[in-house]
Structure formats: C-alpha cells, structure tokens
Image (cartoon, rainbow, N blue to C red):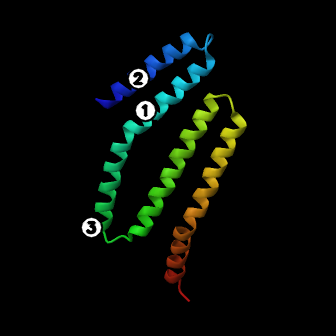
Amino acid sequence: MEIIQIVGLGLVTTVLVLIIKEQKPMFAFLLTAFTGITIFLFLIGKITAVIGVLEELANKANINLIFLKTILKIIGIAYIAEFGAQIVRDAGQEAIASKIELSGKVLIMVMAIPIVSAIIETVVKLLPA
C-alpha cells in the first residue's frame, strides 16, 4: 500500500529533521522540501490515471472537454499553490506563503470565468421571457 510508504517516508524525515534541525537548520529545510517534492512526484502517476478516467467519462457523457480541462486546471492550481505555500511556510516565510495562496485564488477566479458565464447563459435560457 502506497500510503504506508508515504507515511513511513514522512515519519523518517520528521525524525531526521528533528535531530539535525538544531545543528544544521538549512539542511533540515532542504530535507523537508526534498521529501515533499518526492511525495508529490510519487502521486503524479496516480493523478494522471484519475485525469484519464475523468476524460473518458466526459467523452461518454458528451460533456465539452473544454469545461473538464478548465476544472482540472483549477484543481491543479489549487494543489500547486497549497503545496508551494506549505513549503514556503516550512521555511518560516508566512508572508510569502500568503501571497502564493492569494495568487492561486486569483488565478482560479480567472480560470472559472468561462464556466460561470456558461452557467449563467444556461440559466437565462431556462427562465421564461
């Protein structure tokens, strides 16, 4: 089970970071960042499989792939912004982490405009004149 490997890696890294943090704080941060990136890269294969299944389902349901791809991009922005903010927060830079989160939220709003417009157009068409 992959989760056991991920949790094991996280626990081992945590113990190592706690041991070396007092002596070499920069090395402890690099170890933390490297572990986070390793876990993220481990999950990319799983994410790719999920995206493939969602695209297949969208094709079967005759859903416009533009909407699906936009939603997947929005989800990607949210995960990447959160991941980046957590790494920066681990380095003690709360202000920069907040700016990363804000940037992610703004980009999500921009990406969502076509979907919101399509929903509003559909609702307007359904309303009696």
Q: Residue 125 bears which disc, if any? A: none
**Marks 1, 2: nearer the viewer:** 1
Kind of residue sitting beneath label 1? Thr
The structure residue drawn at horizontal position 44% and vertical position 37%, both measured from the top left corner, is 40
Q: Earlier in the sequence, mark 2 or mark 3?
A: 2
- Asked if marks 2 and 3 touch (Cβ < 8 Å), the reply is no
Q: Residue 67 location in percent, x, y? A: 44, 67
Determine whether 78 is above or below 57 in the image.
Answer: above
Whether residue 69 is situated above or below residue 100 in the rendered picture: below
Q: Earlier in the sequence, mark 1 or mark 2?
A: 2
The quarter in which the N terminus is drawn is top left
Q: Which residue is mark 2?
A: 9
Q: CA distance from mark 1 to mark 2?
A: 9 Å
At label 3, which amino acid type do we have? Lys
Q: Position of residue 105 (x, y in %)?
A: 62, 53
- Which residue, given by chain and number where applicable, does mark 3 sit on? 60
In percent of the image, x 58 and y 57: which residue is there?
Answer: 108
Tag 1 near tag 2, CB within 8 Å: yes
Q: Residue 70 or 36: which is nearer the viewer? A: 36
Instruction: Describe the element under mark 1 as helix, strand or loop.
Output: helix
**Mark 2 belongs to which amino acid?**
Leu
How far is disc 1 from disc 3 in space, using C-alphas? 35 Å
Which residue bears the numbered disc 1?
38
Judged from the image, the secondary structure of the residue bearing numbered disc 2 is helix
Quadrant, the C terminus: bottom right
The residue drawn where x is 31% and y is 55% is 52
Label 3: element kind: helix
Mark 1 or mark 3, whichever is nearer to me: 1
What is the C-alpha distance between the residues marked 2 and 3? Answer: 39 Å
The image quarter containing residue 113 is bottom right
